[in-house]
Image: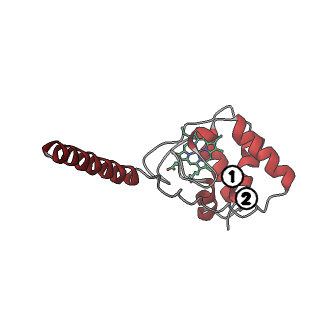
Amino acid sequence: MKKFFIVLAISSVVLACNSGAEGDKKAEEPKAETATAPAPAAPAASSADEEKALELIGSNDCTTCHAIDKKSIGPAYTEVAQKYEATDANIAALVDKVKKGGQGNWGAIPMTPHPDLPEADAKIMIAYILSLRK
Ligand code: HEC
């Protein structure tokens, strides 16, 4: 009879441990995936210019510091487009900024200069970036 109680005591301890383990398992259940942001609206630039611009942005070092619609080291291109209207004067000023580099319009982090970047290429990229304005 005494033996029976010992077995009962041991099995209730084992049961208690098991239920504890189950509780831990529940706490480790993966959290729901975070929702992804909706894709940005189609840009106004003609598709040929857009293709060329994206090619240039990709083949230069721009993507090191910029993403289309997310802030990185530099501002998102969609934010830049919201700040500047696509006028000739703004395009010329931004081409100059990319060539010379600089800081102060978005914060203390400077953009590196791109002195060897052909002006025509810079213009295509800037015109595309400003076309992202909503
Ligand atoms: C080393 C990181 C870096 C690289 C590489 C870089 N940028 Fe920038 N860019 C920045 C930062 C930082 C700013 C914000 C500067 C400021 O506050 O005035 C910026 C700002 C800009 C702006 C807005 C300028 C203004 O005065 O509002 C444009 C347009 C831009 N970048 C385009 C480009 C293009 C095109 C390229 C590729 C040729 C490029 N960037 C490469 C970091 C970078």
Q: Which residue is mark 1?
A: 92
Q: Tag 2: residue type? A: Asp
Q: Which residue is mark 2?
A: 88
Kindly identify the residue that appears in the image at 79 percent across and 51 percent down: 50
Which of the 4 image quarters holds residue 117? top right
Q: Residue lying furthest top in this view? A: 116
- Front-most of 122 and 8? 8
- Front-most of 29 and 31? 29
Q: How many numbered marks have been drawn onto this rendered protein structure?
A: 2
Which of the 4 image quarters holds residue 84? bottom right
- Local crowd size for mark 2, using a 10 Å CA cut-off: few (<14), some (14–19), many (≥20): few
Kindly identify the residue that appears in the image at 70 percent across and 39 percent down: 58
- The spot of residue 60 in percent (x, y) is 68, 35
Q: Residue lying furthest right in this view? A: 48
In the picture, measured across the screen, residue 72 lies left or right of residue 78, that is left
In the picture, measured across the screen, residue 73 lies left or right of residue 126, that is left
Distance between mark 1 and mark 2 Cα atoms = 6 Å
Q: Tag 1: residue type? A: Ala
Q: Mark 1 CB in 8 Å range of ligand 1?
A: no
Is there CB contact under 8 Å for labels 1 and 2?
yes
